Amino acid sequence: MRPNCYVVVPAAGSGKRMGAAVPKQYLTLAGKPVLQHTLERLLAVEEIRHVMVALAADDGRWLQLPAASHPRILTTVGGAERADSVLAGLHALEEIAQDQDWVLVHDAARPCLKPDDVIRLLGHLMDDPVGGILALPSVDTLKQVEGDAILGTLDRTTVWRALTPQMFRYRLLRDALEQALKAGQVITDESNALEYAGYRPRIVEGSPDNIKITRPEDLPLAEFYLGQRS
Ligand code: CTP
Ligand code: MG
């Protein structure tokens, strides 16, 4: 039997670096809230059974999103750090996800995701025992620095930029995140937790327009990418 696919969307951040009046996932971009764009991109992939959205405990905006009433969308309450929100989403899937099912974790703040990239990720990893991530090769020459002094040049071919979705077997990811958090590790993405547990997740090349909206200057860029597709 083919494993089922679920998505966890961490959407419980407050967007400090954006410095806007509302968390960045609720800023309007090309006529819709960022989170609505993100969820529409994910729902366009039919292989995905349910999308579990982890919201801030004091979120008062969610119910205004059209996606809030979509039958494939579920919600839970996130936590203090991104990894806590992801783990909360995984726990909320406990009743429906089997150990070997796939979970894709995708940032709410990446609304320019191409459904085709998700389909390619699924295609590459479906038979893998562990999973992997969308990532981008480095285009610039990379320098190793200390303070403002360059110590050397890194081999560009060995360094990739991690994007989301990151796709792992449900049970492996949940156990790896729990253990890493219990050990006090700072976990910046899901792959990081699997690496800490001794696994070697795979990379699948993604698209440069799958940006994470972080600072105000990212908004016009995201709007441009979204406009190119509609
Ligand atoms: N996130 C979350 N729970 C947290 C922190 C972050 O679900 N406690 C989510 C954010 O909503 C975002 C994604 O994780 O979709 C990536 O995090 P980031 O870009 O850092 O968003 P924020 O934490 O909101 O932004 P900042 O770090 O600038 O405060
Ligand atoms: Mg953050």
Image (cartoon, rainbow, N blue to C red):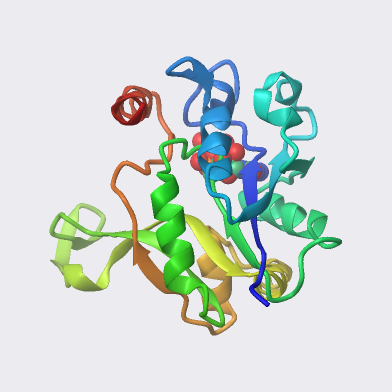
In the displayed structure image, the side of residue 220 where residue 88 appears, left or right: right
In the displayed structure image, the side of residue 86 where residue 219 appears, left or right: left
| Residue 200 x/y as whole percent | 47, 81
Is residue 191 in view from this perspective?
yes
| Residue 202 x/y as whole percent | 42, 74
- Picture quadrant where residue 187 is located: bottom right
| Residue ranking furthest to the right | 95
User: 201 or 16: which is nearer to us?
Assistant: 201
- Picture quadrant where residue 25 is located: top right
Which quadrant would the N terminus be assigned to in this image?
Answer: bottom right
Which quadrant would the C terminus be assigned to in this image?
Answer: top left
What residue sits 76% from the left and 71% below the top? 98
In the displayed structure image, the side of residue 108 where residue 220 appears, left or right: left
Q: Quadrant of ligand 1?
A: top right
User: 126 or 103: which is nearer to us?
Assistant: 126
Vertical relation: 206 (above or below) 30? below
What residue sits 43% from the left and 43% below the top? 113
Could you tell me how many numbered marks the image carries? 0
In the displayed structure image, the side of residue 138 where residue 31 appears, left or right: right
| Residue 61 x/y as whole percent | 71, 21
| Residue 24 x/y as whole percent | 54, 27
Vertical relation: 138 (above or below) 217? below
What residue sits 56% from the left and 74% below the top? 194
Vertical relation: 20 (above or below) 39? above
Is residue 154 in view from this perspective?
no
- Picture quadrant where residue 136 is located: bottom left
